[in-house]
Amino acid sequence: MKRLLAVLLAVALLAAVGAAGGYFYWQSRLDAPLSIETPTLYEVPSGAGFNRVVNDLAAQGVISDAWAFRLLTRLAPDDVPSIRLGEYRLLPEMQGRDLLAVFENNEIVTYPLTIPEGWTFRQMRAQLEAAAKLEQRTGGLSDAEVMTLLGREGDHPEGRFFPDTYRYHLGMSDVDILRQALEKMDRALEQVWAERQDELPLESPYEALIMASLIERETGAPEERRQIAGVFKRRLESGMRLQTDPTVIYGMGEDYDGRITYADLREATAYNTYVIDALPPTPIAMPGQASLEAAVDPLPGDTFYFVAKGDGTHHFSRTLREHNNAVNRYIRNRDN
């Protein structure tokens, strides 16, 4: 009996030693370095689960012991990461556990997409179309159809999207970026409208958006935005036309060739503020945060005119005579 007990103990000990050895060997295979020599982008196939990804990585030679990773699902299911569709950057110095951490932390490779302030919706759509690895869902759709797809049927798209740098990853679409930009502009406009000056000659947040787009297209000098807004405010209050060239350019559309003639200034379009009273019917570009804030917080003063000085800034005048002198100084003399 004692001999049998000793044998059983010996067998149990050997089994324990074997199990411990097997465990440490399994752990060592998870600690093994990846079999790559250069940084590599790995794309998770659509709908792939953990075991499929492990098999795929083994087939590509990235990992050599697929069994060690598959064993996680049996022995340590809590350590099995949920894997999202996308691209993951794998580095030569990584070990198997680093690979698991990359998946667990959703370290998906992302790409920047910048929409500059002052761009039109047409330019934004072209930028989205040119973005590599971004799924295109709006190709061939009209602007109106795009807005319907975004749940904003009947809204004019111009100015509705916030200019910013957005990041996307494989699996995202142009609709995802458009929706982010649309919602961000909604939030920004709601905030500035809530903080607007009293007695503005603007009836709604949308009119503030239109005004902000004019300011955005008139100046790139941050310190001038509230001055421009002040001029436009005083003109609206006094019944003067806004007479801002960017609205003429926008109304010309593809006919604009880089210059405006006197005939263009007299051309009756819905956007020509030399012809129409008050604001144009829609924004003419995507305004940034600073222009939105200026539109609802114009600078007090007594100027009614401004002219470009040729250095990115403007000369502001109180009277038409002073303005005409500034035009002679900064434009006509420059053209001669």
Image (cartoon, grey):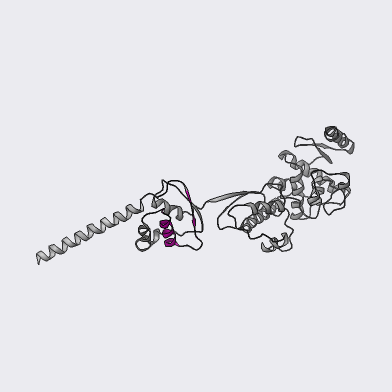
Against 329, residue 72 (above or below) is below
On screen, residue 62 versus residue 168, left or right, reads left
Relative to 286, is 1 on the left or the right?
left
Q: Nearer the viewer, residue 208 or 139?
A: 139
Q: Which residue is found at the position 63% from the left and 57% from the top?
A: 174
Q: Is residue 48 magenta?
A: yes
Quadrant of the image for the N terminus? Answer: bottom left
Residue 83 in the image: x percent, y percent? 47, 59
Residue 119 in percent (x, y) is at: 71, 48
Residue 30 in view, yes or no = yes
The residue positioned 10% from the left and 64% from the top of the image is 3
Q: Position of residue 97 (x, y in %)?
A: 39, 52
In the picture, the quarter occupied by the C terminus is top right
User: Which region shows up in magenta?
Assistant: 40-61
Tell me if 274 is positioned left or right of 102 in this view: right
Judge left or right: residue 307 versus residue 293. right
Residue 201 visible in image? no
- Look at the image and say whether residue 161 sits in the magenta stretch: no
At a point 88% along the width and 36% down the height, the residue shown is 324
Q: Residue 185's x, y, as percent?
A: 67, 53
Q: How many marks?
A: 0
Looking at the image, the residue that sits furthest to the bottom is 1
> In which image quadrant can residue 145 be found?
bottom right
